[in-house]
Amino acid sequence: MRSVAVKSNNPNWLPRPKSLTEKGYRKHMAKQKQTTVNGQEFALQSVSPSWFYDHNDDCGMTGGNRDTKKYVDGLIRNCVVSPPEIANSGLKFFDEKDDIKTPMGLVREIESFLTK
């Protein structure tokens, strides 16, 4: 059986195997960074510039009708790879802990990491 590949938008990355999700593919191909926010360790991974700009536009961050909750949740779910419970739950994880300070700091770290 032949493995089918999906062409990547980034010419520096190898074609993504069809059986691997976009998030899983980025985990292996994208740059990563360890960071600490409020004493908690996080592993971040990059996303493609196209995804980042599309996400900004979808959440209205470049114009009116901002959806900050959707923006923060999307960044956390797509850029945090560890700890896995945060990567899977996104902003909901911090809602359950009644913690606003950590996701605010985490988003600043993610934006800084992606725009360097």
Image: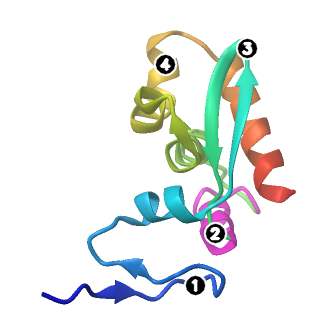
In which image quadrant can residue 100 be found? top right
At label 3, the amino acid type is: Asn
- Provide the secondary structure element on which disc 3 rests: loop
At label 2, the amino acid type is: Ser
- What is the x, y in percent for residue 94? 52, 20
Stretch in magenta? 49-62
Q: Which residue is disc 2 drawn over?
A: 48
In this rendering, would 7 be left or right of 114? left
Which is closer to the viewer, label 4 or label 3?
3
Q: Distance between the residues labelled 1 and 2?
A: 8 Å
- Provide the secondary structure element on which disc 1 rests: loop
Can you say whether 2 is above or below 45 in the image?
Answer: below
Task: Tell whether label 3 touches label 1 (CB within 8 Å).
Answer: no
Q: How crowded is mark 1: few (under 14 residues within 10 Å), some or many (20 or more)?
A: few
Q: Main secondary structure of the magenta part?
A: helix
Q: Which residue is disc 4 drawn over?
A: 95
Q: How far apart are marks 4 and 2 (CA)?
A: 28 Å
Q: Which residue is disc 3 drawn over?
A: 38
Residue shown at 60% from the left, 62% from the top: 55
Q: How far apart are marks 1 and 3 (CA)?
A: 35 Å
Can you say whether 70 is above or below 20 in the image?
Answer: above
- What is the x, y in percent for residue 49? 69, 71
- What is the x, y in percent for residue 89? 40, 32
Q: How far apart are marks 1 and 4 (CA)?
A: 34 Å
Residue shown at 39% from the left, 85% from the top: 6
In this rendering, would 62 be left or right of 82? right
Q: Earlier in the sequence, mark 1 or mark 2?
A: 1
